[in-house]
Image: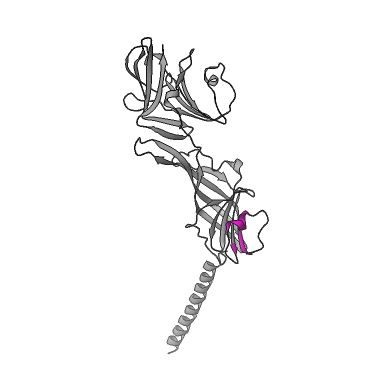
Amino acid sequence: MRKISIFVTNTLKMKRIIGLVSLVLLFNACDDGEITVETIDFSSAAIVKCNLNDVYYKLNGTEILALEMRANRNAFINELTAVGVPRPIALNATDRVVYRSYDGTVSGGTICATIPASSPNVVEEWTATSGTMEVTTTAVYTTNPTTNATTLSKYNHFIVFKNISFNKPSGVQVYETFIFGNFQTDATVLPFAFDEDAVQKCPSSNLIFNFSGSEAFTLDIASSLYPNSVGTRTGVISATNKVTYKLFTSGLNTSYFCTTPTPTTPTLNEEWNAQDGVLNVSGVIEVVTTTETAASYRHTIRLKKVTFQKGTSTFYLGDDYLYGSFVTN
């Protein structure tokens, strides 16, 4: 009987010990530095930029997640990133991420105001002390269903925080990957408001040009494509057959194009160069020459399947674009 009693007593002691160990493990699992709001979720909120400063924020009822990123960090420049190679920006004390919880519903004015609003009041704040912001920039296009021409309308910047460490009232919380979301910037509008009957050629060079306001569309192509004889000639865009679109800060005039050296004003804002072509496939220059008068010829130029590029950005001019025509004697 004594042996049974000892066995029962030992069993009860072991159960108590196991129970205490389980409680300790449970408490340790819960007490890992988390605060009451253990996770922050802004996945359904859109990113908005303040008008008066470089703050980008997301709202979620009584919560704000804000990114303060100076423009000179070039985080959201209109240049595409290579596939799988995002643009890394290190977070620091100035370019930072802040999470705030308030005692009432918040608006953009709460975070963007020069003078902070008196209410609602901040209940809790987390500040990122380290980490990296990775930005993947892609192009957003609109397509003309008739010509298949594409217009680069916006740039989309997909923002992810990597190994971001938040300093909270109750400790530190680290996210290995935290998706901030998509933010879009406008692309420069390229009007392409050219008059096809306004094409001209410089008398002392092969430069053919058309301009409208502050934009210019130039061709520097071999004269063999437009001889004074009736017929159709084709070539492809190359180092010797150049097609260029330029956008300036102010208006142009005819003398700008045929002056040597090229004038320094107006100031060039953007330059897009046509990609090299492949005969009968892409980047094709077609010139149809007809008789204008007994002593002159009209050369009508079409650009087929031409793609323009500036840096890493591109746009497609269309399957068949009428550039215009000019006359030679």
Q: Looking at this view, is 276 or 165 the one in front?
A: 276
Image quadrant assignment for residue 266: top right
Number of numbered discs visible in the structure rendering: 0
* Stretch in magenta: 101-127
Judge from the rendering whether residue 46 lies leftward or rightward of residue 232; answer left or right: right
Which colour assignment does the render follow? one colour
Q: Quadrant of the N terminus?
A: bottom left
Q: Residue furthest bottom?
A: 1
Q: Position of residue 173 (x, y in %)?
A: 56, 59
Q: Position of residue 321 (x, y in %)?
A: 38, 29
Is 126 included in the stretch rendered in magenta?
yes
Q: Looking at this view, is 281 or 268 the one in front?
A: 268
Q: Position of residue 218 (x, y in %)?
A: 46, 23
Judge from the rendering whether residue 18 lies leftward or rightward of residue 51; answer left or right: left
Judge from the rendering whether residue 114 lies leftward or rightward of residue 141; answer left or right: right
Is 97 included in the stretch rendered in magenta?
no
Q: Is residue 222 visible?
A: no
Q: Residue furthest top?
A: 295
Look at 48% across and 16% down and name the residue there: 202
Q: Quadrant of the C terminus?
A: top left
Q: Looking at this view, is 318 or 165 the one in front?
A: 318
Image quadrant assignment for residue 11: bottom left
Q: Looking at this view, is 310 or 293 the one in front?
A: 293
Q: Position of residue 238 (x, y in %)?
A: 41, 22
Q: Residue furthest front?
A: 293
Judge from the rendering whether residue 289 lies leftward or rightward of residue 62; answer left or right: left
Look at 56% across and 28% down and name the residue there: 251
Q: Is residue 85 above or below residue 244?
A: below
Q: Is residue 47 visible?
A: yes
Q: Is residue 196 above or below residue 224?
A: below
Image quadrant assignment for residue 115: bottom right
